[in-house]
Amino acid sequence: MKTERITGDIDRAARIIENGGLVAVPTETVYGLAANGMDGRAVERIYEVKGRPAAKPLSLMVPDPGALERYGRRVSRGARVLADAFWPGPLTIVVEADPAIPAIVLAGGGTVGLRCPASPPTLALLKKCALPLAGPSANPSGAPSPKTADQVAAYFDGAIDAILDGGPCGLGTESTIVDMTGGAWKILRQGALPREEIRRALADSLGIVGVTGGTGAGKTTALEALAAKGALVIDADAVYHDLCRTSEPMLAQIEARFPGSVEDGVLQRKKLGSTVFSDPGALAELDAITQAYTLEAIEELLAGHAAAGGRYAAVDAINIIGTPLRERLTALVGVLADEDTRVARLMAREGVSEQYARLRIRAQKPDGYYIENCDHILRNDGSREDFRRACDKLFNTILEDQSDG
């Protein structure tokens, strides 16, 4: 067999594919070995030429995000979010496979990886063929992936029908593969697209409402109203305290900056406090460390919720204004109530004295601080039922605006 070198004749490459042939094609990562993904015999030739184990499924190259619905079933909202964010690009999204896809592509499984490559010649070929292309890297199994047409020829000259020469591949690393089939997201292969960018895209797809305000103002009722609308409710303070117990990297960074503040893996709060509370610069450094880890942990929770089909989230945080988390919010809602109401609630809830309750409340930020820095204010001076209705009205508006956007 003579292997053709095609430089710009997309029609010629499409005819070879349509007739069951193999064409090596460029992507932004590495060259792939492409065949009609709906032709079982053509796909079988890929396995034969590459020496690929039959137990390893193949991914399919597709021309656009709409292919998720054409070749997948029960595609999650999270999968669509990632396709819209990164296609064309170096991301393979694993979804439940449509029954029409040949079994050989799936290697006996029920899922398929779909990828839209950011390579103009290959995208043109995909659109011309109007077929998904099975397209593993164009190398014998176990050999380095080729980044140029010459490297492909060194492997397969005379063994495949053609090479679509699109010049050298820019990235030289395979696509990242993310599994979106199980109500969660999981990196199956870390490739050219960083995990952090995937997580960020999922988290950013949510409508995120921040809820803040002083003790006794009624944030819990507001958060319950959001949870009833399907929002994931995240207590930022609880996330931080959990990290203080479990995050070895955060504790190590704190110990490196403030020696002696961590002993046997346990944060020594009093010792650390004696260092930072009298030194504003040191306190700012500690806040920078803990805020970074807290935001990352919150983003993991948000991404997981989005991958499972969630659309909204709520973050409960007293100290959210002026932190990096503030920038992530669709809206920040301040919950306020008059002092006497807050005192009565605090006394009833915690069994403290009136004097203690007033001292605690007056040590916190005044109402003006929240009025100046929040996008919306909810007042909670009346009955719980009236406040719940006010919450529902405001949150419906915020979340409907998010859906429209």
Image: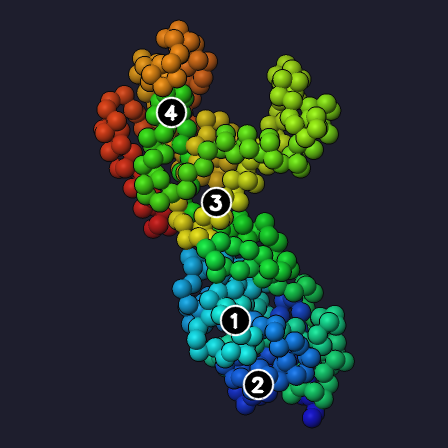
Task: Please say if 124 is above or below 226.
Answer: below
Marks 2, 1: nearer the viewer: 1
Verify CB contact (< 8 Å) between mark 2 and mark 3: no
What colour-coding does the image apply? rainbow
- Above or below — where is 369 with respect to 202? above
The three-letter amino acid code for the residue at tag 4 is: Ile
What residue is rendered at 75% in x and 76% in y?
A: 151
Mark 1: secondary structure: loop
Specify which label sits upstream in the sequence, 2 or 4: 2
- Residue 108: percent from the left, percent from the top? 53, 74
Query: Label 2 belongs to which residue?
Result: 42
The residue depicted at 56 percent of the width and 75 percent of the height is: 107
Residue pointed to by mark 3: 302
What quarter of the picture does the N terminus occupy? bottom right
In the displayed structure, 81 sits above or below 160; it is: above
Residue 276 appears in the rendering: no
Quarter of the view holding residue 89: bottom right
Q: Which residue is mark 1?
A: 109
> The disc labelled 1 sits on which kind of residue?
Gly
Q: How far across and down, in percent of the image, does residue 312 sit?
A: 39, 45
Residue 191 locus on image (x, y percent) = 64, 60
